[in-house]
Image: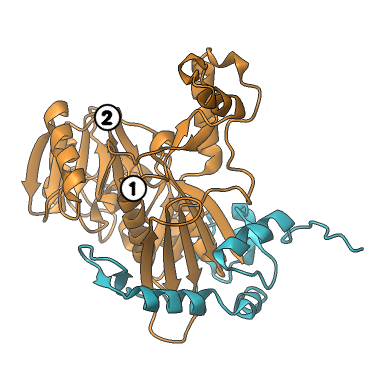
Amino acid sequence: MFVHDGVIGADRSTQTRVRVVTDSPDIALFAANMLVSIKHSAFVLERDCVAQLLDIFSTQHTTPLYNPESFPRNILVVANTAWDAAEPVVASDINPDSDSSVKATVIAAGPVALDTLWKAMGHCAAQLAHIPGWQAVIGGGGPAHNAEAAGVRSLFVQDKHWRLAGQGAVDAVHLTATAVAGPKGGVALIVSPDAAAAAAAVQGSLAPAAAPVDGKKKGGKGATAAAGVTLLGAHQVVWLPTGIAPAFAGAAVDAKAVGGADALPRGSVQVAADACVGMEVPRLSPHPVQIISVGGSATDGLTEEAADVYRARVATSKAKEVSTKSMQEALKLVAAL
Amino acid sequence: MQVMQNRNGMNVDVNYSLLPDGIVPGGDVWRNAQTQALLMYSSGKVTKRRAVVSKIAAKSVPMFATDEYAGMKVMDVGDFEDLTEQVRWPAELWASHCSE
């Protein structure tokens, strides 16, 4: 049995913790590539702590995620590839009344495609975002609790421990979109229900020379106008007041679109037609200057609350909303950013 | 009195952490295994660049949720719980598959 503990969301304040339990090392590789690693978030947190020199009183470890017994898994994924009692299926359930904290469960019964796995995980993370009781906020150490009980919380210096927040991340909007940066550094969100945008961005990042801007096929089927396009986050992003944070650390895309199995970097995994590639993505990117919808709308699938936050964020960031009919057109727009 | 000793694949803390989720390990459990270990355990083909081409015959499947969401079919909570019990049990299934 393989267990992978990771998180969805590169930004520490809004990330959702995920535990994947599976019988397959290949699914464990998928989880290792797709989920943001705990070590990465710990490193980022330590770096932030150094920047905030006020934290001189903290002597304890700042990330309580290493202990498997205390790992607060908000999403549990059970992927049993050997299950053959019926047709394969992926099902999810969100339980806001769980004993410890709000919890979601994803069951992958039988050999299921990778895209259904990340879609189910991303769906759960998006739904959990607005429910109280899952989000971790700074200030969870013993002295902080004592100060709160004594009514002198406001006098307490933050200790960088984390505790469950009393409310959801109302400012975080989970969008089914791929975040990319153009050659000049402009950030765009490509809103697309399929993984084509991520595939193009991964292709541009892995082998930019094989993807000419003019869109002529050069690297076989799937070669696109992705040269100079940098991937900032595939499939799903979290739009925060401070910028764009990727939900996943990797991308699961059509293997042919990224050059086939032989072109995949070390540790990647191909399951059927899909390849899962781990990518180096930034924790936080600037607000987008353009939101490009391909065959849909950015607010599709959002709750009314999340859609309101989205519209407000578009207005404050002055992002331009554009619709295109094809991914090629979308990539041409990105190439100008 | 016999005290359980941790070894590679048998960590008492990891095993206990699975119990609240109703999962009882029937064999070794690897938590956040290194890429090299996962490559070694994979039954798929390992390429020259050390990627894995899995043998899992995966296919696109319908997605269900216990509530109404766009793009998902609705599954009864009772049916979901039945499915959960089937998939995470019996523990022997996990053990036999992992030992292949």
Q: Who's the residue at 27% across and 35% down the image?
A: A171
Point out the image quarter for the C terminus of chain A: top left
Q: Is residue A31 left or right of residue A220?
A: right
Q: Position of residue B4 (x, y in %)?
A: 83, 60
Who is closer to the viewer here, B62 or A193?
Answer: B62
Q: Which residue is mark 1?
A: A131
Mark 2 nearby-residue class (10 Å; few <14, some 14–19, many ≥20): some
Q: Residue B43 appears in which quarter of the rendering?
A: bottom right
Who is closer to the viewer here, A161 or B33?
Answer: A161
The colour one sees for chain A in the rendered image is orange
Q: Position of residue A160 (x, y in %)?
A: 53, 26
Q: Who's the residue at 63% across and 50% down the image?
A: A68
Q: Who's the residue at 22% across and 45% down the image?
A: A212
Question: Mark 1 vs mark 2: which is more N-terminal?
Answer: 1
Q: Is residue A40 left or right of residue B9?
A: left
The colour one sees for chain B in the rendered image is cyan
Point out the image quarter for the N terminus of chain A: bottom right
Q: Is residue A279 left or right of residue B43?
A: left
Question: Eyeballing the image, is A205 above or below A85?
Answer: above
Q: Position of residue A229 (x, y in %)?
A: 26, 39
